[in-house]
Amino acid sequence: MLKKRESGFTLIELLVVIAIIALLMGILMPALSRVKDQAQTIRCSANLSQYGIGMRMYLDDNSARFPTRNEWMSSEEGSSWLQVGETPNGTFWPYVKAEDCHMCPIFARLVKNDERFHNTRVSYLLNSYVGNDGEIWSNWLGAGVKGVKKETEVFHPSEVVLFTEENTFTIPDYSNYPYNDNLFTCGNAERQIDNYATFHNTGDRELGSVNIVFVDGHCDSRPRAMTDEELDEGFRLAWPKKEIP
């Protein structure tokens, strides 16, 4: 007569089940992480789309003139770069008052344990080659070279950056400065100043893509520039005039 098996699992059976669960978790976790990043990238894109709509209204109210770099997201406390706890006073603020549209969720995650950015309230940047009465940061493009004052001066508005993102870290041969103000001053292959963020849609934060809203208001994602030619194309994307200086 066969002996009736007692209920319950043997140690070997439990170990097999645990091993299977661990294997499944190892397979699923990267996929779940990618899905989470994609969802956060979409949310970031939606934030930038609101910035695009806000700028459309701003330009309509201000004779198509872009805002100045020191005032577009300033504070009553005198900061030209809005910080946590400060009272917004920027000329662009009334057009993007929603509190939850100013921070990319992936950016927020990256800086959570970085005390340099604990007071950051806005993670998006205005292209420094538009507005500010045409004046640009430094004379790195040559004496007398200026950007544009008005939307009507922009060549191909659908291919010129309006707002974008930066990394909180530098990458050799790509960018010399991390996120450190409210302006985006894109360099080229000869001089890597600021450059586009690389932390979207990637397992390697240095090799991913960036969200950009263009002067015409549409939002898009672009991969990291890898070669000298692509670095120059990145500058072309930010430069608002037809002729390259």
Image (tube, rainbow, N blue to C red):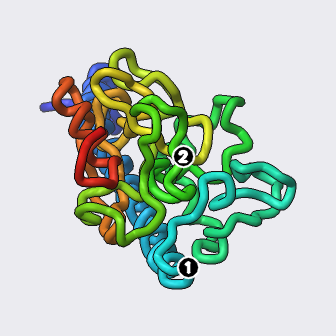
Image depth: mark 1 or mark 2 in front: 1
Q: Is residue 224 left or right of residue 119?
A: left
User: Looking at the image, can residue 17 be seen?
Assistant: no
Q: Position of residue 177 (x, y in %)?
A: 51, 26
Residue 139: mark in rendering: none
Give the CA separation, mark 1 to mark 2: 20 Å
- Side of 198 where 179 appears, left or right: right
Tell which circle, 1 or 2, labels the residue nearer the N-terminal end: 1
Q: Amino acid at mark 1?
A: Asn
Looking at this rendering, what residue extends furthest in the top direction? 172
Circles 1 and 2, Cβ within 8 Å, touching? The answer is no
Task: Check disc 2 and report the residue beneath it.
Answer: 183
Instruction: Depth check: give the residue in front, 34 or 143.
Output: 143
Indicate the quadrant containing the C terminus: top left, top right, bottom left or bottom right: top left
Q: Residues within 10 Å of mark 2 (few under 14, many from 20)?
A: many
Residue 155 vertical placement versus 52 (above, below): above
Mark 1, residue position:
62
Furthest toward the front, the residue is 144
Indicate whether 122 appears above or below 218.
above
Q: Which residue is pictured at 68% across the width and 59% down the height?
A: 71
Q: Position of residue 43 (x, y in %)?
A: 42, 61
Please name the amino acid that badge 2 sits on.
Leu
Q: Residue at x 49, y 54 (%)?
A: 134
Q: Is residue 182 visible?
A: yes
For the N terminus, the quadrant is top left
Quarter of the rendering containing residue 42: bottom left
Number of other residues with Cα within 10 Å of mark 1, as a class: few under 14, some 14 to 19, many 20 or more: few
- The answer to which quarter of the image holds residue 26 is top left
At mark 1, the secondary structure is loop
In the rendered view, would you say 105 is above or below 155?
A: above
